[in-house]
């Protein structure tokens, strides 16, 4: 799958449409977009417009995800268009999404299943909002089928942030391992680390709404840890009798409730 870097700039507002210029190197296409009714119209007819129409679904997804109040003349954004991307496959939660940075800075693709011999990290988190204390748990299964468990209490985080911290801690614990599968019940982790982060980095860690990405330090830490690695992301439904996920959930909750002594590895 090829990644093509494009740039957009909102030129003017002609109610109800915003006129937007999209650039690919020296080529330009102008489109009209109504953020209220989600209507998209192509104004330019050229080879780039034909190419862009073939990837219209990705363009629409970006424009639809942008908040209405962040449309204004002068707004600019750099973004990636994935050529050959099977959008339905990426949105299929049963698929495995792969981030392969061994030779390419950001090679991403989808698998129905994987036969790779690799270490697995099962991760989960829990957050007690009233107490302001959270916990994470990571189960490491090596290629021989042996298990070990790590859990840790963490203060002043939210549930989504802690899910990300759990994935990061797992990679830190296996820093010397090249091939890893992360099994998580968090779409925030799965999508953030395989789709969103590419565009954030291109825009100096700004979102499609022109705002600073939340938890920048954590995302940047993951970005650094993933260099030179082959990482598979498998999503599982939480609280659905998945053995390792259920165990991670229990240990994460235990870590948040017994924070005064909880940090480190546990033999299994």
Image (spheres, rainbow, N blue to C red):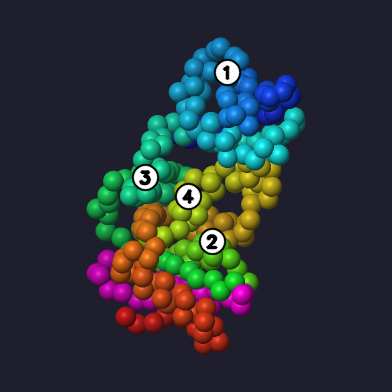
Residue 128 in the image, given as x and y percentages of width and height: 56, 74
* SS assignment at label 1: strand
Q: Residue at x 31, y 67 (%)?
A: 241
Residue topped by disc 4: 191
Mark 2 or mark 1, which has the lower sequence index? 1
Q: Residue furthest bottom?
A: 261
> Label 2 crowding class (10 Å Cα cut-off): few <14, some 14-19, many 20+?
some
Whether 175 is among the magenta residues is no
How far across and how far down the image is residue 70, in percent?
Answer: 70, 39
The answer for how far apart the CA atoms under marks 2 and 1 are is 37 Å
Give the answer, above or below, for where 166 lies relative to 40: below
Q: Is residue 35 above or below residue 187?
A: above
Within 10 Å of the Cα at label 4, are there few (<14), some (14-19), or many (20+) other Cα atoms? some
At 63% from the left and 27% from the top, the residue drawn is: 34
Q: Disc 4 vs disc 3: Cβ atoms closer than 8 Å?
A: no
Q: Are marks 2 and 3 in contact (CB under 8 Å)?
A: no
Q: Quadrant of residue 159?
A: bottom right
Q: Do we see residue 7 in this rendering?
A: no
Rounded to the nearest angstrom, the CA distance separating label 3 from label 1 is 29 Å
Which of label 4 and label 3 is nearer to you?
3
């Amino acid at each position: 799958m090829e990644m093509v870097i494009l740039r957009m700039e909102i030129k003017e507002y002609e109610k109800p449409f915003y006129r937007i210029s999209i650039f690919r190197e020296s080529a330009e296409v102008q489109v009209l977009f109504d953020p209220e009714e989600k209507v998209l119209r192509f104004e330019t007819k050229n080879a780039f417009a034909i190419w862009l129409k073939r990837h219209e679904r990705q363009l629409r997804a970006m424009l639809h995800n942008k908040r209405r109040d962040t449309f204004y003349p002068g707004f600019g954004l750099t973004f990636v268009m994935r050529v050959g991307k099977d959008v339905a496959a990426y949105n299929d939660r049963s698929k495995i999404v792969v981030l392969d940075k061994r030779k390419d800075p950001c090679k991403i693709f989808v698998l129905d299943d994987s036969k790779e011999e690799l270490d697995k990290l099962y991760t989960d988190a829990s957050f007690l909002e009233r107490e302001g204390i959270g916990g994470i748990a990571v189960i490491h299964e090596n290629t021989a089928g042996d298990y070990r468990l790590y859990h840790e209490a963490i203060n002043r985080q939210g549930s989504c942030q802690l899910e990300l911290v759990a994935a990061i801690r797992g990679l830190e614990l296996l820093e010397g391992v090249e091939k890893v599968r992360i099994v998580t019940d968090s779409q925030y982790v799965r999508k953030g680390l395989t789709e969103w982060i590419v565009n954030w980095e291109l825009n100096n860690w700004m979102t499609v709404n022109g705002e600073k990405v939340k938890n920048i330090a954590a995302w940047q830490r993951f970005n650094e840890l993933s260099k030179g690695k082959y990482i598979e992301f498998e999503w599982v439904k939480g609280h659905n009798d998945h053995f390792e996920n259920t165990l991670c959930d229990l240990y994460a909750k235990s870590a948040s409730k017994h924070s005064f002594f909880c940090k480190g590895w546990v033999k299994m």
